Amino acid sequence: MRATIKDYQEVEQAAMNFVKSVAEGNSKYAKALFREDAVLFGVLNGELEHGSIEQFYKNVDSVGADKNFKARVDVVDVEETLAVVRVLEEGWGGSIDFTDYLLLLKLNGEWKCVAKAYNQNSDTVKR
């Protein structure tokens, strides 16, 4: 069964919790999106970062808000209980650009993120 526009809107709304957390430097919104056992994978400043989503929460809370932060949410695909979202971020912490992919599952009628993988734009890597 093809997903409806409403399904895509629900996924986008859920993903906006991720954006709001980064924009405000407050992990409380992301905690509503991610399952407690969600995982994180990416390369930050040339070093592999992986493990619990708790690391993302720590990063968000320690970096804080930046007035120049911008983001775009693209719902790539929705298939009944599975969704893939791409989030483009510019100016995270005032200087880093990321592309994030969020993998969401619809559990008990609610979209929850189970995995976050990201790429740091090479132009923003601290050397």
Image: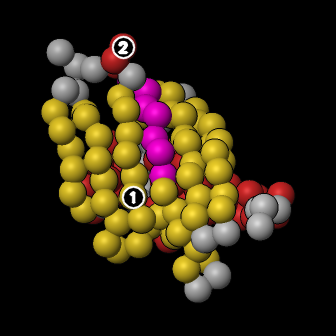
Q: Is residue 99 left or right of residue 50?
A: right
Q: Amino acid at mark 2?
A: Asp
Q: Give the mark nearer the N terminus: 1 vs 2.
A: 1
Residue placed furthest toward the front: 1
Q: Secondary structure at mark 1?
A: strand
Q: Residue furthest bottom?
A: 108
Q: Horizontal and vertical percent for residue 103?
A: 48, 57
Instruction: Residue at 25% x, 35% y: name it.
Output: 43
Instruction: Indicate whether residue 96 is drawn in magenta.
Output: yes
* Type of colouring: secondary structure
Residue visible at 31% across and 72% down in the picture: 37
Q: Quadrant of residue 87?
A: top right
Whole-percent x, y for residue 41 in the image: 29, 47
Instruction: Establish if 42 lies above or below 127.
Output: below
Front residue of 69/87: it is 87
Left or right: where 62 falls relative to 121: left
Q: CA distance from mark 1 to mark 2?
A: 25 Å
Q: Is residue 19 above or below residue 47?
A: below
| Residue under the point 52% across and 63% down | 104
Category of crowding for the residue at label 2, using alpha-carbon neighbours closer than 10 angstroms: few (below 14), some (14–19), many (at least 20): few
Q: Which residue is mark 2?
A: 123
Which residues lie in the magenta part? 95-102
Count of numbered badges drawn on the protein: 2
Mark 2 lies on a secondary structure that is helix
Quadrant containing the C terminus in the rendered view: top left
- Image location of residue 56, percent across then percent down: 32, 53
Q: Where residue 117 sits: x, y (%)?
A: 37, 46
| Residue topped by disc 1 | 115
Amino acid found under the numbered disc labelled 1: Ala
Along the horizontal axis of the image, is 41 left or right of 111? left
